[in-house]
């Protein structure tokens, strides 16, 4: 089965449940009634974050005169844009598993525990206030640009009033030589005015260097670096092998999977076929097993997540190779009515990303 790329919206399925100290459910809250509470078990969604870098070269206005006036060789005269992948990372979050909706019925008499759900209806805790985890959504590309310098800010009136491009190039080259001569005279102590304190001297030299660099871009051209971040959400129902995650082109950057202008970047998600109970604190595991051994009453379900290895790669490079827990690769287990009646004060917390039991008291 193919993985699904999901752009979530922030719709609320079920509200966080509130209750009194005696465990009474608040009225008119979605997900809870006087008879019971309904909740989702989570599926693990993987958010892949791709940071791409775009380098753009623009030829200078006077590039054709670079060798004549400044003896600059191999100056490029054509625009160029080159993309590269700088980094790929992942994070995980729980989203409702629409195939795993359960209702826990309350007894007619006796105390009822307080149930806490996430904003989208995933069971979060019993008799514990647990900080909610934000759900990440697929985002539009985030761009990070470098500051641009305008060389015209350093052009003299004579340069701007020149009658031709060739004359402007000649006068600009002379201005560059004048700046270099001024800087050399200052550093050698031969200038008519040399600042007496170090900070002023440093500022003057930096200002001259900035002027020279800006004017040189009219011959050398400019190179700009821009970082663009893309996010892709993946919710695998089962293991996948060599599934195209996105395509990438050195000329066009990150592309959709169906755009053949780019080469594929694949994702493998390998199910390791094991639960995470071995990774649980031994005392918590004993308590959980004791709760599961009681088969009477109403059931409260949770996930025992599976483990998977995730790999993202292309024909030349492995960008990421990481192990992680995935709720839907594991099994659904049960905690029974020990949380009702006399045991209504039992405290349980769940991992809302994997659905597993974190603590039980």
Image: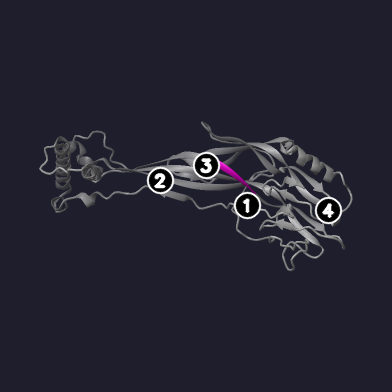
List the residue tagged with mark 1.
Answer: 133
Q: Quick one: label 2 or label 3, which is nearer the N terminus? A: 2
Please give the range of residues in magenta.
Answer: 89-93
Distance from the alpha carbon under mark 4 to that under mark 2: 58 Å
Q: Nearer the viewer, mark 1 or mark 4?
A: 4
List the residue tagged with mark 4.
Answer: 343
Distance from the alpha carbon under mark 2 to that under mark 3: 19 Å
Please state which of residues 185 and 232 is positioned toward the viewer in this rendering: 185
As drawn, the label of residue 226 is 2
Residue 334 at x, y = what percent? 81, 47
Query: How many residues crowd around disc 1 within 10 Å: few (fewer than 14), some, or many (20 or more)?
Result: some
For this orientation, the residue located farthest to the bottom is 28
Q: Secondary structure at mark 3?
A: strand
Q: Disc 2, disc 1: CB below 8 Å?
A: no
List the residue tagged with mark 3.
Answer: 247
Q: Quick one: label 2 or label 1, which is nearer the N terminus? A: 1
């Amino acid at each position: 089965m193919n993985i699904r790329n999901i752009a979530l919206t922030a719709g609320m399925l079920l509200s966080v449940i509130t209750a009194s100290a005696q465990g009474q459910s608040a009225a008119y809250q979605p997900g809870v009634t006087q008879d019971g509470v309904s909740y989702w078990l989570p599926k693990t969604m993987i958010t892949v974050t791709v940071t791409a870098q775009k380098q753009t070269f623009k030829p200078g206005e006077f590039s054709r005169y670079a060798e004549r006036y400044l003896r600059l060789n191999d100056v490029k005269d054509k625009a160029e844009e080159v993309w590269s992948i700088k980094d790929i990372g992942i994070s995980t979050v729980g989203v409702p598993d629409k195939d795993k909706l359960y209702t826990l019925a309350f007894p007619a008499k006796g105390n009822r525990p307080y149930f806490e759900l996430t904003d989208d209806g995933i069971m979060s805790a019993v008799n514990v206030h647990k900080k909610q985890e934000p759900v990440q959504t697929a985002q539009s590309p985030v761009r990070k640009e470098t500051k641009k310098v305008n060389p015209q800010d350093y052009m003299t009136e004579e340069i701007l009033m020149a009658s031709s491009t060739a004359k402007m190039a000649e006068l600009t080259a002379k201005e560059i030589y004048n700046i270099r001569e001024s800087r050399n005279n200052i550093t050698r102590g031969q200038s008519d005015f040399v600042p007496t304190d170090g900070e002023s001297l440093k500022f003057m030299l930096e200002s001259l260097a900035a002027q020279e660099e800006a004017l040189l871009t009219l011959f050398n051209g400019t190179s700009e670096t821009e970082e663009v971040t893309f996010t892709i959400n993946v919710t695998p129902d089962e293991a996948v092998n060599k599934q195209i995650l996105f395509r990438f082109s050195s000329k066009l950057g990150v592309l959709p999977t169906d755009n053949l202008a780019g080469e594929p970047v694949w994702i493998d998600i390998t199910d390791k076929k094991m639960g995470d109970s071995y990774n649980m604190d031994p005392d918590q595991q004993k308590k959980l097993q004791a709760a599961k051994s009681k088969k009477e009453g109403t059931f409260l379900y949770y996930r025992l997540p599976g483990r998977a290895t995730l790999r993202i790669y292309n024909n030349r490079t492995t960008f990421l190779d990481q192990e992680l827990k995935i709720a839907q690769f594991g099994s659904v287990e049960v905690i029974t009515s020990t949380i009702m009646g006399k045991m209504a004060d039992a405290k349980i917390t769940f991992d809302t990303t994997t659905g597993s039991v974190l603590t039980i008291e």
